Amino acid sequence: MGVGEQPILVLDNLSVSYGESRILRDVSLTVPSGQIACLLGRNGVGKTTTLKSIVGLLRPTEGSVNFDGANVNRWVPEKRTKRGIGYVPQGRDIFSMLTVEENLMIGLQARPRGKGNEIPREIYDLFPVLQSMLGRAGGDLSGGQQQQLAIARALVGDPRLLLLDEPTEGIQPSVIQEIEQTIMRLKQQGTVSILLVEQYLEFAWRLADLYYVMEKGAIVSQGLTKDLDEATVKKHLTV
């Protein structure tokens, strides 16, 4: 992050509860502008809850979500999306009965006013497989193609922050490699910052600038990804 450049996302002592159960406990993390941060941890520790809190699907009981210098705790999800938060949920959530093109057109609803109402050409540059499938139903695509469609749909909205929840889950290695190359291209372009939730450690290791490890709803380790050591992995990430 450059001198004087504010981070795109700051979570400050964020706590979230489901009923009587406290799921997140004083979570603080930062995503610097133009960089990739990964949130690591075993299943069920609160990673997805963290992303849902950022996008506005869950309200914090304590602490704050700060996006681009503004406290967005009271913003509805639609406002957060319009202001530049893109979200690709675990399981992808594409519309299986709609065509690939129709799925992408839905992403246009998130674009700020004045940004146009056509699918940007760059989307097909990033995901060439989708251009040849525009008329196919989303449900007819393979898991890897659906994941590419879900990421592309989020990018159509021209986000400044992209939240990716387990993008490699259930996908064959060749497509994982394609998704990795796409994320790396986005990073090199420097127009979107990314918070990546991932179980596939090698994937996160290659892409992310910094890491946060979550356990029982709290951040227990953090630092530069290049400094993530085997002891931390063994203690917090291996099953």
Image (cartoon, helix red, strand yellow):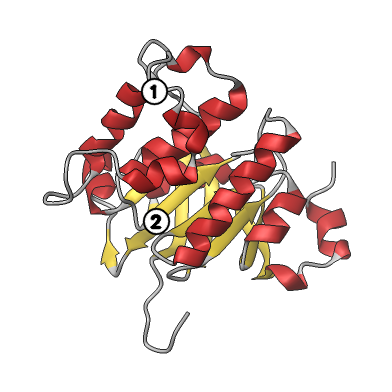
Disc 2 target residue: 161
* Mark 1 neighbour class, 10 Å CA radius: few under 14, some 14 to 19, many 20 or more: some
* Mark 2 neighbour class, 10 Å CA radius: few under 14, some 14 to 19, many 20 or more: many
Q: Which mark is residue 134?
A: 1
* Residue depicted at 66% across the width and 47% down the height: 216
Nearer the viewer's eye, disc 1 or disc 2? Answer: 1
- Check the picture and name the quadrant holding the C terminus: top right
Query: In the rendered image of this protein, does residue 44 appear above or below residue 34?
Result: above
Is residue 36 shown left or right of residue 191?
right
Tell me if residue 217 can be seen: no
| Amino acid type of the residue tagged 2 in the rendering | Leu
| Amino acid type of the residue tagged 1 in the rendering | Leu
Query: Element at badge 2?
Result: strand
Q: Which mark is residue 84?
A: none
Residue 12 percent coordinates (x, y): 43, 65
- Of all residues, the one furthest to the left in this rendering is 114
Q: Which is nearer the eye, 81 or 155?
A: 155
Name which of mark 1 and mark 2 comes first in the sequence.
1
Is residue 123 shown left or right of residue 107?
right
Residue 140 percent coordinates (x, y): 51, 12
Q: Which is nearer the eye, 159 or 27?
A: 159
* Residue depicted at 45% across the width and 17% down the height: 138
* Residue depicted at 50% across the width and 41% down the height: 49
Residue 100 percent coordinates (x, y): 39, 23
* Residue depicted at 30% across the width and 35% down the height: 107
Q: Which is nearer the eye, 19 or 197?
A: 197
Residue 114 percent coordinates (x, y): 11, 51
Q: How many marks?
A: 2
Tell me if residue 129 can be seen: yes
Query: In the rendered image of this protein, does residue 141 appear above or below residue 63?
Result: above
Q: CA distance from mark 1 to mark 2?
A: 26 Å
Query: In the rendered image of this protein, does residue 55 appear above or below residue 208?
Result: above
